[in-house]
Image: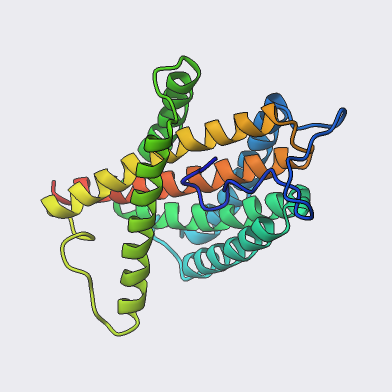
Amino acid sequence: MRSGNPVLQGSTFLDSGTGTIVTRDSGAMTLNGTVNKTGALLLLALITAAFAWNQAVGADGMPLPAASLYMIAGAVGGLVFALVTVFKKTWAPVTAPLYALLEGFFLGSISAVYEARFDGIVFQAVLLTFGTLFALLFAYRSGMIRATENFKLGVVAATGGIALVYLATIVLGFFNVNVPYIHESGLIGIGFSLFVVVIAALNLVLDFDFIESGVEQGAPKYMEWYGAFGLMVTLVWLYVEFLRLLSKLQSRN
């Protein structure tokens, strides 16, 4: 079983000691429980995002220096707790909410920066993110989209390629070298962002399939938090990519 989401992999529902599927007669992972915990993580992220937004924007509507501080602290802190959650899945009931809180700081501050430059872009990105989530959930539940092995392999490969491109961009940035075209508002840059948005959205399908498999296999109760965490990671990625795409489109106006 494979997921394009790096935190939801084929060994997620395996017992770390024996490598066998973990099953329990009581206290097993449920779909409703995972949905409820996903909602809880989104609420926590919303609370800190609203706080960061208010702290990052001045009376004139322009970003304050605090915006960069919240953005960096949220991104780095979120990454730390994401890694802890991946390697210590049993800690997910604690680390997943902490991840959501820290990602809220990042999302609130980066949203404030984009909104200061492109009026209304945050509302559009939010609508597109959740519209995509519910549309793909409906398509998955109705059987219109199936996570076949070839489908999974293609999405995983594309996700890995995108990760390598972003990693190269970060590394080259330390040497003041910019990757041309893909981060600009030209046709190539917009096409690249569209491709990334599509791949991020397709990762949602893999996440739905992975969580459903965990429920069917009777994964332990704490995996509800881990499944919600994995879905949250994809939603954060999708939202940020929508911000980038919309900013490129508005820059051409």
Q: At 51% across and 43% down in the image, what residue appears?
A: 2
- Can the viewer see residue 121? no
State the image coordinates of residue 140 (x, y, percent, origin top left). 46, 22
Residue at the outermost right position: 26
| Left or right placement of residue 120 versus residue 87 in this view | left
Residue at the outermost bottom position: 175
Q: At 69% across and 43% down in the image, what residue appears?
A: 13
- In the displayed structure, 143 sits above or below 160; it is above
Model colouring: rainbow
State the image coordinates of residue 220 (x, y, percent, origin top left). 79, 38
- In the displayed structure, 65 sits above or below 214; it is below
State the image coordinates of residue 40 (x, y, percent, origin top left). 68, 37
- Can the viewer see residue 206? yes
Image quarter of residue 64: bottom left
Q: At 52% across and 53% down in the image, what residue appears?
A: 6
**Which one is nearer the viewer's eye here, 153 or 123?**
153
- In the displayed structure, 159 sits above or below 235; it is below
- In the displayed structure, 40 sits above or below 167; it is above
State the image coordinates of residue 203 (x, y, percent, origin top left). 44, 40
**Which one is nearer the viewer's eye here, 237 or 67?**
237
**Which one is nearer the viewer's eye here, 123 or 211?**
211
